[in-house]
Image (spheres, rainbow, N blue to C red):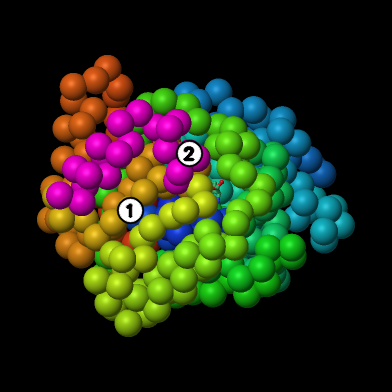
């Protein structure tokens, strides 16, 4: 096989309490990427979208990932990649991760499945480094594995764990403002008091247990963040109102998606998630801020082979 088209899903990193460890994949939106093996030892990148992303292989997220894979296998060939981004860059729902993970998975398929999923996470992190300067693993792990994932250790990545979970739907609102991941990381303290750490890891453990047991009440109680939200929420207009509106509409809980500006809430049914997104949308109705909204289930498989999507549509 010399050509493959994949769908690469959006992801929610952190899942409120699991900063840089937890994530899950969304069914909507997703990017479309077609990768071809070419004889020339080069990487050619074409974008079918209006985001003006760089196409130099060293500066493009997918290009950096493909370059690291070609270097790793000392390849005597190259890749041509066409990308239609449907996940807006800077949205906080894993746009760069989708490019990075999609490129890694597509390349692995063309290379005869020679790498493990954990190895693909390591390659994909090279793309995250291009996007934001940090080799963040949570979005790319959820994007490659699908479902809910926990990354136990990050240097190097060890134990990307797929988490059992009950039926859950996500309501996501993306206010059209820009927050750079590097800036959202810069506002966070480097060190935390032990009491804060204890509260945080109590919630992480309880969230994982709540997901495994299908205990929605425990999930709801565990969606609490003392590490990122207090410092980042000021970057998102009307953040507290959004959360209140979502909770009143029946959400289990939620918070900032990744580094923002998207805000997500989890709900037990698609109907409740629809009510939640409408309630959050009404918060921005009285402002000048435009939004994109998504209601999605949890995408189970991660990056997958596409059969029916044409670039640019
Ligand atoms: N865990 C990362 C952060 C995700 O919150 O900075 C970035 O999308």
* Mark 2 or 1: the one toward you: 2
Image position, residue 133 (x, y; %)? 70, 40
Seen at 58% across and 67% down, the residue is 151
Q: Mark 1 points at which residue?
A: 254
Q: Give the range drawn in magenta.
A: 229-248
Picture coordinates of residue 131, whole percent (x, y):
64, 38
| Residue sitting nearer the eye, 150 or 66 | 150
Q: Nearer the viewer, residue 307 or 97?
A: 97
Could you tell me which secondary element the residue under label 2 belongs to?
helix
From this viewpoint, which residue is outermost toward the bottom? 213
Tell which of 64 and 206 is nearer to you: 206
Q: In which quarter of the image is the C terminus?
A: top left
233 in magenta: yes
Q: Where is residue 245 in the image (x, y as percent from the top left)?
A: 19, 43
Q: In this view, does 189 lie above or below 110?
A: above
Residue 143 seen in this snapshot = no
Badge 2 density bin: few <14, some 14–19, many ≥20, Cα 10 Å: many
- Where 194 falls versus 92 (above or below)? below
Q: Distance between the residues labelled 2 and 1?
A: 14 Å
Name which residue lies at 49% across and 63% down. Answer: 200
User: To which quarter of the image does residue 292 belong?
Assistant: top left
Can residue 19 be seen? yes
Which residue is rendered at x = 29% and y = 24% of the image?
A: 290
**Image position of 103 with respect to 195: above or below:** above
Left or right of 239? Residue 181 is right
Q: Determine the main secondary structure of the stretch shown in magenta.
A: helix
Q: Mark 2 points at which residue?
A: 232
Q: State which tag comes first along the sequence, 2 or 1.
A: 2
Q: Residue furthest top?
A: 288
Q: Where residue 92 sits in the image (x, y, percent)?
A: 46, 41
Q: Residue drawn 40% across and 45% down?
A: 256
Label 1: which secondary element: strand
């Amino acid at each position: 096989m010399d050509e493959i088209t994949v769908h690469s899903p959006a992801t929610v990193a952190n899942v409120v309490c699991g900063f840089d460890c937890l994530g899950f994949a969304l069914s909507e939106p997703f990017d479309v990427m077609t990768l071809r093996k070419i004889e020339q030892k080069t990487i050619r990148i074409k974008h079918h979208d209006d985001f003006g992303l760089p196409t130099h292989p060293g500066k493009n997220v997918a290009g950096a990932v493909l370059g690291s894979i070609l270097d790793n296998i000392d390849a005597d060939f190259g890749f041509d990649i066409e990308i239609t981004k449907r996940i807006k860059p800077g949205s906080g729902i894993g746009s760069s991760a989708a490019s990075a993970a999609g490129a890694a998975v597509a390349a692995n398929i063309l290379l005869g499945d020679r790498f493990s999923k954990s190895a693909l996470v390591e390659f994909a992190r090279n793309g995250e480094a291009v996007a934001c300067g940090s080799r963040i693993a949570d979005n790319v792990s959820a994007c490659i594995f699908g479902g809910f994932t926990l990354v136990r250790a990050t240097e190097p990545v060890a134990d990307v764990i797929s988490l059992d979970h009950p039926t859950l739907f996500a309501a996501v609102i993306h206010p059209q403002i820009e927050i750079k991941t590097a800036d959202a990381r810069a506002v966070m303290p480097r060190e935390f008091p032990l009491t804060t750490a204890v509260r945080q890891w109590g919630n992480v453990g309880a969230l994982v247990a709540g997901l495994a047991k299908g205990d929605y009440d425990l999930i709801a109680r565990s969606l609490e963040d003392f590490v990122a939200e207090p410092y980042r929420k000021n970057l998102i207009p009307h953040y507290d109102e959004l959360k209140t509106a979502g909770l009143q509409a029946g959400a289990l809980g939620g918070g900032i998606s990744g580094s923002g500006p998207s805000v997500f809430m989890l709900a037990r049914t698609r109907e409740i998630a629809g009510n939640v997104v409408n309630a959050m949308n009404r918060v921005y109705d009285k402002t000048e801020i435009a939004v994109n909204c998504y209601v999605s289930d949890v995408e189970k498989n991660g990056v997958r082979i596409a059969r029916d999507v044409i670039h640019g549509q």
